[in-house]
Amino acid sequence: MKRILLFALLGLLLFGFFIVHQLPATYITSRLPGNVVLQGVEGSIWQGEAALLSVNNQPVGKLNWQWQLAPLLSGQWGYRLEIAGDAVTGNTRVALGFDQQLTLSQLALEIDGAYLSVLAQPNRNMHLSGVFVIDSPEVAIKHNWPVSGSALILWQDAGLYGDLPMQFGALEAAVTMVEQQLVADLKDNGGALELDGTASLSPQREYQVDLRLRARAEANDNLRTSLKLLSAPDLTGRHRVVFHGGL
């Protein structure tokens, strides 16, 4: 009797695996949030692609996914994702646990600044230039908020274009979690703008920014004028800018 039950259980498991294995990719895509849309979906839940991923009605690029075994060993369901678009490229490994914690690991992402500024503020005349490069060994997210991890964000060829075009150079933000807050150490890596400061964002979406800025010799008049409008310089020529608010 025990042997019969064992074979019956094994048969049910194999049948269940067969059923899951046959599930099309649309089984997952139909369960995405309303602001995330996949078009031209092919493949299965194990491996597939979408010709176009859109977020908030903005096209991002082609998306590929492949199921990963390793997260399953720790009670998670995981994939390797790759995105390829005109303005966004990158890849990461994602794992979702039974506690609904989402973990991103080996994240490497490049986003065109102009594209990012349109996503954030589509009606503004001033847009970002340059490229944002994001690298993170691991970030864990739960209830739509990071709970652990770190990331390095580089803004290469940083600048603003619009009525007052300005070039900054290369800027950097090292982001970590400190007492449930996102905290960033900010600095420049050379260029027209000298930058040193910090920024933080709380789970309640309250932010604080403290910056010390100075124009270098290669800075244009637009940048120098803008810094003077922000604050008066100190004896070293640095402008301190402090502001806070909510998102």
Image (spheres, rainbow, N blue to C red):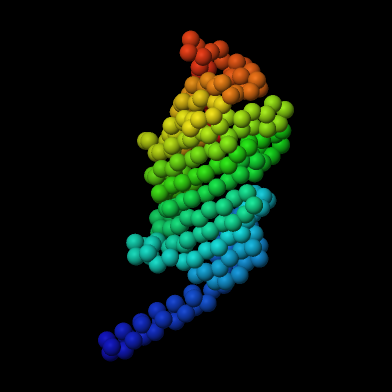
- Most extreme residue toward the left is 2
- Most extreme residue toward the top is 235
The residue positioned 68% from the left and 32% from the top of the image is 161
Is the residue 166 above or below the residue 8 in the image?
above
The answer to whether residue 200 of the structure is visible from this angle is: no
Q: x and y percent of residue 185 in the render?
A: 43, 32
Left or right of 228? Residue 152 is left
Q: x and y percent of residue 189 in the render?
A: 48, 32
Q: Please state, as top left, top right, bottom left or bottom right, where the C terminus lies in the image.
A: top right
Q: Please state, as top left, top right, bottom left or bottom right, where the N terminus lies in the image.
A: bottom left
The residue positioned 49% from the left and 40% from the top of the image is 153
Left or right of 149? Residue 89 is right
Is the residue 58 above or below the residue 74 in the image?
above
Q: x and y percent of residue 73 in the render?
A: 34, 65
The answer to whether residue 23 of the structure is visible from this angle is: yes
The residue positioned 41% from the left and 58% from the top of the image is 97
Left or right of 210? Residue 61 is right
The residue positioned 49% from the left and 21% from the top of the image is 212
Which residue occupies the foreground of this view, 49 or 164?
164
